[in-house]
Image (spheres, rainbow, N blue to C red):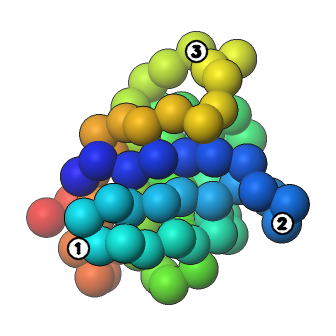
Amino acid sequence: MKIMIRRSPEGLSIYVPKKDLEEQIVESEYETLWGGWIKVANGWVFDLPEMASDTRLPITINAKKRDETGHDP
């Protein structure tokens, strides 16, 4: 699923163009985000690709959305 990760005044957020949805990132596996999972305010969990820790934001990436139980589908 294509998502955009960007900085907002409240912290990091994602935007999902196909759903016209913007949500705050509330939890992440790694401080640098990349290569781990993130959880957004609506409960969705995404696996992010490996990228350099200094990757500039905003950025549009392909992220894998986990199923409702938080596991890979």
- State the residue position of label 2: 10
Q: Earlier in the sequence, mark 2 or mark 3?
A: 2
Task: Between residue 47 and residue 24, name the one nearer to us.
Answer: 24
- The residue type indicated by label 2 comes to Glu
Mark 3 residue type:
Ala
Up-down: is 10 above or below 64? below
* Label 2 vs label 3, nearer the camera: 2
Left or right side of 24 for 15? left
- Residue 70 seen by the camera: yes
In this view, the mark in front (3 or 1): 3
For label 1, count other residues whose C-alpha is less than 10 Å away and answer few (under 14), some (14-19) or many (20+): few
Which residue has dot 1 on it?
Answer: 67
Q: Please state if 73 lies on the left or on the right of 48 as rendered.
A: left
State whether residue 67 is above or below residue 12: below
Question: Of 73 and 42, which appears nearest the observer?
Answer: 42
Q: Amino acid at mark 1?
A: Asp
Assign a secondary structure to mark 1: loop
The residues tagged by marks 3 and 1 sit, at their Cα atoms, a distance apart of 26 Å
